[in-house]
Amino acid sequence: MDNLLPALRQIPFGRILLAFIAGILLQNYCPCPARLLLAGAILLSVIWAAWLLLPVGFQYRFRWVQGIVLSGMLVVTGAAGVWLQSIRNHPAWLGHTYQQGMPLLMQVTEPPVSRPASWRVMAQVQAMQINGQWMPVTAKLLLYFQKDTVPPPVPGTQLISSKALQGVSSFNNPGGFNYAAYCARQHIFHQAYLRTKDYQLVGVQALPAYQRILANARQAVLDNIHRYIADKQLAGVAAALLIGYRDELDRELLTDYAAAGVVHVIAISGMHLAMIYGLLCVVLKRLKPHRQLRWVHVIITLLVLWLFTGLAGAVPSITRSAVMFSVIVLGQAFYKRHNAFNNLAASAFLLLVHHPFCLWDIGFQLSYAAVAGVMLFYQPLYQCMIWQNRMLDYIWQLTALTLAAQVLALPVVLYHFHQFPVFFVLSNLFIVPLSGIALYAAMVMLAVYWWPWLAALTGKLVAWCIAAMNVVVKQVVVMPAATTGAVAFNDWQVALMIAGILSICYSVWLRKKAGWMAGAGMLAAVLVIDGIGLWQSRSQKRFVVYNIPSATALDFITGTRSYLAGDAVVWQNRELYTRHIVPAHTCWRVGGCARAAALSAIPVFTFAGKKIALVTTALVPTAANARVVTAPVSTVANAPAAKARLAAVDVLVLGNEAGAQVAELTQLFGCNQVVFDSSNPVWKIEKWKKACNGLHLRFHSVPQDGAFVMEL
């Protein structure tokens, strides 16, 4: 790159994309009403029309004004796209008129997904009964059907239910995944739990033809995978590898793949579509030289690419690849040269026009960061070392490709996952070739499904490759320091790190010292922000009651140490601990964790000058091999049976087995704040709330309001 500006002029969609994203972010974080957006669009249109009437010489002299106006139009367009895409702005949205108990006519739109105790399905509300009349409404719902003798509804099933809808909720634990926000970006705001008596089947209405074809094809692929790959775990990986179906993936295995840095293999991505595109190029290469047949090549390629995209659920990572390859194929058909960076920006722009909220999709962010990294850094890295040996050259190509993909993906990985796989290069050297063989073998298996002997043979090859992948992953994750420790990364650090990396690259390409200095300064700022956060964490003191379903979990945080008290299941269940406790500890830079004490019927904890009483019998003593810590958290003796006041406490935490009334407990403990933990059912909490209102007591419902956090 001899000059940066000429190169940037070849990427017009890059500038369009940046302005459009600015509009999306503006509308998401600072919502503007439709009238204001319309006024902005009209004002910019008037300015543009007036600009066109000015002399050409004046326009050229102040051409930067033209750029500002066009960028403003794109910002308004991006904001308007968010407003239009938000289902809550639709006049027929269910939430505008719905009241509990109103009958709803719903249609199941996706195949059921098995959960531990229920079936989860996606449904579309078609009508709502108001004053005896059915009125058309629109909304997406998550329906959970109790697992019993009745099979789950299939796509197209229509049913009527008057069961009260509930809002989609999150656990709202500090640093945890915000499931409600995730569903909101999918236009889902309500859910319902249905038993057989709660709904009435109306019939089965045929889905649109393309949905039926894709659903049947997807189910046929899954059936053949299970037919020719007997092992359930291996079949789950094969389904994820081939069509991105992850509902049968073993959660622990998925965690190991993420820790080894190869989760992209089983999270359907552009790599899979690139392999299919490469295979199509080899198979159909004889058609390209013929002028009359080149369109046959184009049509077959596009059909196969988009059919596979549909089978994979059209997730952003693979849709991006489908758009890019479509542009490349059509450009070659018209003998047009293409710019890879412009194609990448164009595909992102088209995806965001179709669905602006996919900007927050982790797959979208990782996919574009990895591809941009490969485009920018692969060739410079590969040319650093030239090998004459073919095998060594292949290994270096794969290594350079892996490193290039991680350069820009690193900030995104640290931000979302708070860890980084140290041995990702080593694991990719084995996993990528094995996954390629497994993918091609799986395609052959599906192509010859009608020939059981050959299909079974290729199925064994697929199973062997996946088993070998699992072994490699297991060996990598048990290596010392396989992943970095918990990394607390905020928005500013991500932006500064990406800008710093690009600035250093700019200085390398153009040999500008200023780029080195600016990039080094930005990366230093990332470390300074991290250091400030670590310094502040050393003086923190917090008391936390976590929202963990049907469990009690209290956390006393002092500096970078944590002392947990609660049900044994919180300690014993790795998934619960990782999902609910670890994100909070990462957010607050907590490095050590231990049990606070063996809990009795009514312990009173003294922590940072505050007294906290826990009333529950659902807790178990600490196991003999657990570490018991009494300082800095101290425990007062059991409460006496009499109702005489034991002590004045600052916080009273009530568990599920707290049978006493709130009034009786306030006689025993004088308190300022009552917390209902997540082991309590909602109906009991509602009774306690009324009692607290009568006593003029402050209260916090953990299951309804999220984790309780007290800064001390």
Image: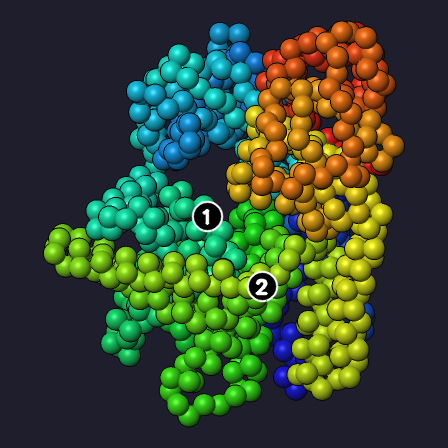
Q: Residue at x 56, y 49 (%)?
A: 361
Q: Nearer the viewer, residue 519 or 34?
A: 519
Amino acid at the residue labelled 1: Glu
User: Which residue is disc 2 drawn over?
Assistant: 481
User: Which residue is disc 1 drawn over?
Assistant: 252
Q: Is residue 331 left or right of residue 666?
A: left
Q: Residue at x 61, y 16 (%)?
A: 657
Q: Residue at x 66, y 64 (%)?
A: 15
Residue 193 on image: x %, y %: 48, 22
Tell me the mark number nearer the camera, choosing from 1 and 2: 2
| Residue found farthest to the bottom | 388
**N-terminal label among 1 and 2:** 1
**Quadrant (top left, top right, bottom left, bottom right) of the C terminus:** top right
Amino acid at the residue labelled 2: Ala
Residue 235 on image: x %, y %: 31, 49
538 shown above or below 55: above
Task: Using the rendered view, name the quadrant where residue 513 is placed.
Answer: bottom right
Q: Label 2: few (<14), some or many (≥20) within 10 Å?
A: few
Residue 212 on image: x %, y %: 31, 39
Q: Residue at x 45, y 75 (%)?
A: 398
